[in-house]
Amino acid sequence: MASLNHIATIFADYKYDEKVGFESSNGEPCLGCITEIDRDISCACVTANDPSRCVVCEHYDIKCGSIPSELLGAAQMYWNFVARLEGQERFLSRRQIWRIRRALVACGSAWRELEEHLMNPNNLAMVTLQESVANRKTLNLSILQSAGANLSVDEVHERLDAIQPPYARHGNCVVTLRNALAHLSVSEDVVVGSVEEEGQCDSFSNGSPDKLKTAMEDASGSAAVCKVTHAGMPYYDFQ
């Protein structure tokens, strides 16, 4: 599950710059296109017949949802970084391209996991339940201390860490995404020590299926003006 408050805290350093916007995009891309650009760095959020649904989401038959405001800064950094990669292969070694591509895959995987939570209509209810359970356990711990339970400072900290709701624990998809984005920005020059031998490749991504490429090329509309559907919130028009 994913909490918008937790997302806002984790990505507090990523500030959205309205003047910069999203490069190579006629408007703010949808969340679905943000999760797709690791597979195709030339991915474009464009519409054809329906201004509320982009051709990418239409191709994959998924719901076209907006980017939560709490994620706009991170999404902008990611989108613009990837947009600037186009045509840069000739300036990099094949090993550097491989490193960046590997980092993109990690980012894409984290974005898709987070999107899955945010687009789940039960997300808000489950986050609320997790917080309720955590609050009850915190209250129980407080009562124990008030009653004179002999707990060391370290033990109290351990119990508080264990009490945290699952969405806020270390290793959750929000933290994974933050770490993946931080690595992406320096990936071309960072040796990947977790593999026996680094690979080499000629491109940053495989690109979209031919049918989707054609649809993006033929589409004449701007980015989708989609509904806010994240965190189990009711539908309302995004302005």
Image (cartoon, rainbow, N blue to C red):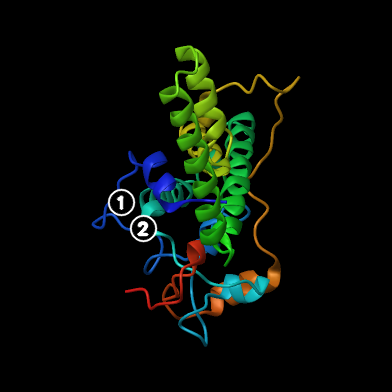
Residue furthest to the front: 147
Q: Residues within 10 Å of mark 1 (few under 14, many from 20)?
A: some
The secondary structure type at the circle numbered 2 is helix
In the rendered structure, find residue 16 and report the number of the disc placed on it.
1
Q: Measuring 40% from the left and 77% from the top, which residue is drawn there?
A: 236
N-terminal label among 1 and 2:
1
Badge 1 marks a residue whose secondary structure is loop
Left or right: where does residue 114 sit relative to residue 138? right
Disc count in the image? Answer: 2
Q: Evaluate if marks 1 and 2 touch, with contact meaning CB atoms under 8 Å apart.
A: yes
Q: Residue at position x 54%, y 35% from top?
A: 169
Residue 130: assigned label: none
Estimate the x, y position of residue 232 in percent, counting from the top left.
51, 66
Give the amino acid type for the residue marked by disc 1 in the picture: Tyr
Q: Residue at x 66, y 74 (%)?
A: 61
The answer to which of 238 and 223 lies nearer the viewer is 238
Name which quarter of the figure residue 196 lies in.
top right
Going by the numbered disc 2, the residue's amino acid type is Ser
Res. 69 mark: 2
